[in-house]
Image (cartoon, helix red, strand yellow):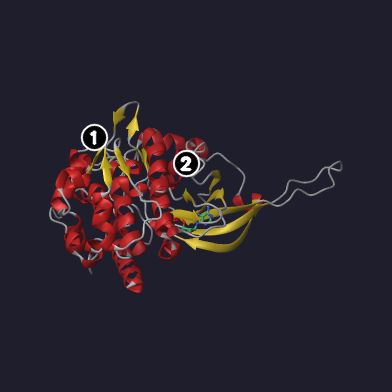
Amino acid sequence: MFNNIRKHKENIRNELRTHLFGKQGLRIRRSVDIENVIVQQEQVQSAVRFKDAYVLQEQIGEGAHSVVRKCYKIPKQRSTKSLMPKSIQVFAVKCFRTDDPEIVNTIIQTFNLQRQLHDIPYVCRTYDLFIDQQTKHHYQVIEYCDTPNLEQVYRSLTLRQKQDTIKQLAQIIAQIHARGISHRDLKPENILIQTEPNLQIKLIDFGVSKRFKYRDAFTEMWTATGTILYQAPEVFLGGGYDEKVDIWSIGIILYQLLCSTLPFYAETISETIEQITSPDPQFQYSKEFLKLNPIQRDLIKRLLKLHPHQRLSAEEIPLHPWFEQENYVDVSSDDMILAQDMMIGERTMSNQIGTEITEQQFQNLMDSLEWGRRIHFIQ
Ligand SMILES: Nc1ncnc2c1ncn2[C@@H]1O[C@H](COP(=O)(O)OP(=O)(O)O)[C@@H](O)[C@H]1O
Ligand SMILES: [Mg+2]
C-alpha cells in the first residue's frame, strides 16, 4: 500500500516533469514580471561566492527542484585577540542548477518572501542566497533542522500527534495567509516534524509560494505548480485561484494521515486531474474513508470542498470538534456514542435527534452550528 503511494507519486512526478520541462530538465513556466526583474538585478550584485563562505557537507534531502545538503560557514579570520574559534554552526543549503532566468527569478522571489516570514518561528529561516550566473549553480542557505519530514514519519504518529500536526499546520498557514501569502505547495515532504519532547512542525520549501494580496489588491495565482496530488481543483480548472488552495492541500494531508492512502490518485495525470475536479469525488465511498468516524469525515469534507469559498479558512480549522477529541480511541463502534455526547450549546446531540444519527443528519447538524464557537465534547 505505502509502496504503491510512493510509486504513484514518483510516476506522476516523472510524467509531470517531462510534461512541464521536456527533455531539457528543470524548467518551470511562469511569467516574469517587471518588479521581480528589478529585484533580481539588485540582488545579483553580490560578489561573494557560496564556496568562499560555506563548506558543503553531505546530502540530507532532495526535492522537486533542488538537492538539499548540510553546510557550515567558514569562520572569518581570527584576530590575534580572539584565540578561541567560534563553534561551527551548521546550516542546510538548497542547491539549484539552472540557467533559466525565470527559475532564477523564482528562487530570488522565494528568498525574499521567506525572509518576510522570519518572525514566524515555525517557518524555516533562510539566511543567504547566492546566484551565480556563470556557473549556473545557485545556493539558498537555510536553517538546518535535525528532524525528518512528515512523509517519512506519518505512519508512526499517534492520533493525538496527527491532530497536533494538522492543528499547527493550520495555525501557521493562518498566519501566512494573514500576510497575504499562500504556500501553494503544502505536502508532507515540505513539512519537517519533531515529535519529542513536544510535537513541533516547521514549514519548508516556499519555492512556489506567492503573494496573493498586494496593496490590498488580490492577484490571482495562475501557475499550476507543485505535486498535483495535493493541488486544488481550481488550479486545473482555470480562472485563477487564491489562498484556499492551501486549505485543500491540508485536506489531502489530513486524509493521508488518517487513511494511509491518498484521496485522489490514478495511473495518469489526466485521470488524476479528472478525479480531483469531479463534483462527486469517489474518495467518499472508499473503504478507508468510511472507516473513519463522522467527525473525522466531516472535517475532511469541509477541507476538500470543490468550491474554494465553501472550504474552511485556516483560522477556522482548529475550531473543528475533531481537535477536541483528546485521546480518542479510534474505534468506529464508539463513533455514535461520541457523537451523541457532543454538546451544542446547552443541548446534547442525543436530545436533539435521538439515539441514531445518519451521516446526512450529522452533516446538517454541523452545518447548522454557529461554526466553531459553541461546540464542546464531553470526554
Ligand atoms: N532546513 C532543512 N533541514 C533539514 N532537512 C531539510 C531542510 N530543508 C529541506 N530538507 C529536506 O530536503 C527535502 C527537500 O527539500 P525542499 O525544500 O522541499 O526542496 P525542493 O524545493 O527541491 O522540493 C525535504 O523534504 C527535507 O527532507
Ligand atoms: Mg519540496
- Label 1: element kind: loop
Circle 2: residue type: Gln
Circle 1: residue type: Glu
Q: Residue at x 13, y 51 (%)?
A: 360
Location of residue 17 by image quarter: bottom left
Q: Please name the residue that numbered disc 1 is placed on.
A: 370
Mark 1 to mark 2 CA distance (whole Å): 36 Å
Q: Can you tell which mark lies on residue 114?
A: 2
Neighbor class of circle 1 (other Cα within 10 Å; few <14, some 14-19, many 20+) is: few
4 above or below 247? Answer: below
Viewer-closest of 261 and 29: 261
- Label 2: element kind: helix
Q: Position of residue 27 (x, y in %)?
A: 36, 55
**In this rendering, position of residue 376 left or right of residue 189:** left
Outermost residue to the right: 80
Neighbor class of circle 2 (other Cα within 10 Å; few <14, some 14-19, many 20+) is: many
Mark 1 vs mark 2: in front = 1
